[in-house]
Amino acid sequence: MCVNSDSQEVHPELEIKFKYLLYLTAAPVVNRYNRRVSVSAEPFNPDEEEEGTEKRVVHPKTDEQRCRLQEACKDILLFKNLDQEQLFQVLDAMFEKKVKPQEHVIDQGDDGDNFYVIEQGRYDIVVAKDNVSCCVGHYDDRGSFGELALMYNTPRAATIVATTEGALWGLDRGTFRRIILKNNAKKRKTYESFIESVPLLKFLEASERMKIVDVIGEKVYQDGECILSQGNRADCFYIVESGEVRILMKSKTMTGKANQEVEITRYGRGQYFGELALVTNKPRAASAYAVGEVKCLVMDVQTFERLLWTCMDIMKRDITHYEEQLVAIFGSSMDLKDSGN
Ligand code: CMP
Ligand code: CMP
């Protein structure tokens, strides 16, 4: 829900439009404290890094803390392309931070000090523009935030507010830039031409495609492995980098019981899946399985909403196509857009 500076509620339809506008007009905001001069999205040059960032940071941890940290970090996409030594250095440098309800972990406009991984808690993402603050999304017990200001030397692009008690793991700016950004320079070389060839992304500006490359992670699946399951909560979007993915669906019988899974389609290099649940805010409509070894580029829901708004029309057109496909396979129509609530 959007609220203006006098705390009046804004109609939900306006909220959606506002979210869309925010994406389109996501200009850097003015830095309240003026501590760092650069506000443009500067490209990263690993050979010209800030002085003093070569120092290795270590926050000693108990075995119990390390276990919790590893669990919290296991699905963090920005860590997926690190080698083992880089990952050890990142984990060594991370420190624990407990937060209270209503605490601002990050304030829009501030300089970026840390990147955060969520161990626990719920956090609202609030973006202010023209004196109107709008909650554009939230994190629920998982995920990470605070990478943008560190990657592009821009002021914080949103305010992150804890709405419950929470536990976070922080990573300092120096270590983030030394390890994650150096790795991103490699990632750009690896994925730049592939991302350019993905039909869904061809209408984006080259700089927007680069931003996608900077935040996606690669995941590898073995033959037969389930990538996502029908009915599950959705938090990621997938682009097939190599291999083949089968999409299977269980329809419901007249008595409401689930039938056997039926294959409805297959996807190969450059195609995407897992967008439907993110667009409709519903559980996964089908399951996806790897055929042979499969590599996917994976994006979290917050990044999907922030960077792929302009592709929404294409994805919405797919929904009509999916519904027609289901009529052809199951003989009855299913309303995939219906929220089901
Ligand atoms: P940063 O700008 O460093 O600090 C605020 C963080 O909020 C930002 O990095 C992202 O990690 C996160 N975020 C999530 N969704 C959005 C959004 N729609 N706009 C801006 N920041 C967002
Ligand atoms: P999602 O519902 O998030 O997860 C399952 C994915 O299967 C879905 O997104 C689509 O990307 C993909 N899919 C392919 N064909 C269909 C279809 N006919 N109906 C629903 N989902 C489909």
Image (cartoon, rainbow, N blue to C red):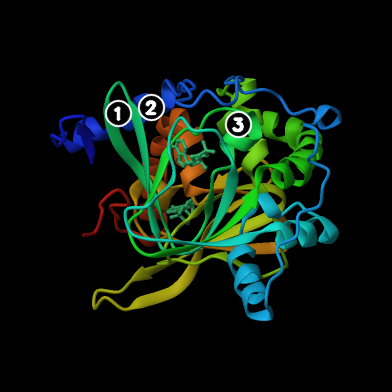
Q: Nearer the viewer, residue 297 or 107?
A: 107
Q: Earlier in the sequence, mark 1 or mark 3?
A: 1
Circles 1 and 2, Cβ within 8 Å, touching? The answer is yes
Q: Position of residue 114 (x, y in %)?
A: 59, 46
In the rendered image, is residue 218 in sight? no
User: In the visual, does 168 lie left or right of 255?
Assistant: right
Q: Nearer the viewer, residue 168 or 127?
A: 168
Q: Which mark is residue 22?
A: 2
Marks 3 and 2 sit apart, C-alpha to C-alpha, by 24 Å
Q: Quadrant of residue 269?
A: top right
User: In the visual, does 257 lie left or right of 184?
Assistant: left
- Under mark 1, the amino acid is Phe
> Which residue, as the protein is rendered here, is positioned at the far left?
8
Q: Quadrant of residue 254?
A: bottom left
User: In the visual, does 100 lie left or right of 144?
Assistant: left
Label 3 lies in ligand 2 vicinity (Cβ under 8 Å): no
Element carrying mark 3: helix
| Residue linked to disc 3 | 199
Label 2 lies in ligand 1 vicinity (Cβ under 8 Å): yes
Q: Residues within 10 Å of mark 3 (few under 14, many from 20)?
A: few
Q: Give the residue at x 62% y 29%.
A: 153
User: In the visual, does 326 lie left or right of 65?
Assistant: left
Placement of 191 over or under 337, stated as above or below: above
Q: Position of residue 282 (x, y in %)?
A: 34, 56
Marks 1 and 3 sit apart, C-alpha to C-alpha, by 27 Å
Q: Give the residue at x 60% y 25%.
A: 36
Q: Give the residue at x 54% y 33%.
A: 111
Q: Give the residue at x 62% y 60%.
A: 95
- Under mark 3, the amino acid is Pro
Element carrying mark 1: helix
| Residue linked to disc 1 | 18
Element carrying mark 2: helix
